[in-house]
Image: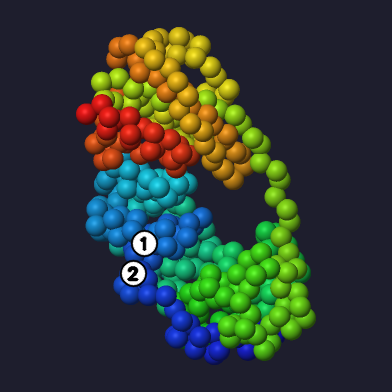
Amino acid sequence: MNQLEQLPIPLLQWFQEHARVLPWRSDPTPYHVWISEIMLQQTRVAAVLDYYRRFLDALPTVAHLAAVEEDTLLKLWQGLGYYNRARNLQKAARQIMEEFGGVFPASYEEILSLAGVGEYTAGAISSIAFGIPVPAVDGNVLRVVARITGDRGDILNAATKARIRAALLETMPKQFPGAYNQALMELGALVCLPNGAPLCEQCPAASFCTAYQEGLTGELPVKAPKKARRVEKRTVFLLFHGGRVALRRRPKRGLLAGLWEYPNEVEAGPAALEAWGVTPRTLEAGGAGKHIFSHIEWHMHALLAETADDTLPDGWVWADGRELEEVYAIPNAFQAFSDTVSARLRSSL
């Protein structure tokens, strides 16, 4: 991987000229870098910006994050998905308060010990906030390095990741580790794009990149195909009464654990309402939607009902428009029905 020895100077020069201005780069405290890195997992930068600002306005310190009520935390996270990221943030914040006296730990090993923090996140925080020369290897970085070096290992394989991480550790500029890690990520996000569509003419590594020089950008990186997702057909019940919509909380474990949702069941019909003790006064189709999780797809259709009274099963709640906006965190999985629900609640005012 001797190409990596040639990379630091042209990459850092490119980064100095092309780096996006981002709030966590402008003020790279450990807390800010940590929050941004967790938010950016599985989420695009553009989508994170508003959430990041709102989150820090509400929870400006580790102590605030450790103390906040979980429902408030999940509401702040609503729209980002993967809600266990938020729960792990709070677990880690409480670790920091209890084990580190409220001071963000300053070594790679201690940061790695925090809940929800893996090698990549620990490397990012360590290098960016503390100047520790340790790589931060995410999907963007794996793609960049595989193409530059011509590595044909499966980048989803632990051995390939370990090999690339070791090569980066050996060749990264020890005086600029944070900038170098961010530059690698930025190159993957802006230039060395996935799916065989990189902008090689704009790349500072083009003159020594194996994939570009040998016409292999469509073949690298190598990634084993994912297993096909299971499709699950679900019926979503949009139940209304007195200007409110019915919600129930999901179980504490499993998919979307502990979040509020519109009641739904696998391929259910109106008979489900009877089983719940809910009497519909009207019943009609309420639209359709689809949501893709990592291992499953929900194909949903909705039944919309105005109920005869306010009877609901134990633990369910009626929520008005303000409460949907400010109190209850509804997963993105039900985004397809948001406009329908909002319109119905407005019409009942």
**Mark 1: which secondary structure?**
helix
Amino acid at circle 2: Pro
Q: Name the residue under label 2.
A: 23
Q: Position of residue 194 (x, y in %)?
A: 63, 66
Which of 145 and 217 lies nearest the eye of the viewer? 217
**Can residue 194 be seen in the rendering of this structure?**
yes
Which of 244 and 223 lies nearest the eye of the viewer? 244
Q: Quadrant of residue 214?
A: bottom right
Q: Which mark is residue 49?
A: 1
In this image, 294 relative to 35: left or right? right
Q: In which quarter of the image is residue 140?
A: bottom right
Dot placed on the residue nearer the N-terminal end, 2 or 1: 2
In this image, 86 relative to 198: left or right? left
Which of 251 and 16 lies nearest the eye of the viewer? 16
Q: Quadrant of residue 33?
A: bottom left
Residue at 74% across / 84% down in the picture? Answer: 213
Screen quadrant of the C terminus: top left
In this image, 333 relative to 198: left or right? left
Q: Where is residue 10 in the image (x, y as percent from the top left)?
A: 55, 89
Q: Where is residue 141 in the image (x, y as percent from the top left)?
A: 59, 70
Mark 2 vs mark 1: in front = 1
In this image, 171 relative to 55: left or right? right
Label 2, label 1: how far apart the Cα atoms are: 8 Å
**Mark 2: which secondary structure?**
helix
The 10 Å Cα crowd at callout 1, few under 14, some 14 to 19, many 20 or more, is some
Q: Do labels 2 and 1 touch, CB within 8 Å?
A: yes
Amino acid at circle 1: Leu
**Can residue 160 be seen in the rendering of this structure?**
no
Query: 225 above or below 12?
Result: above
Screen quadrant of the N terminus: bottom right
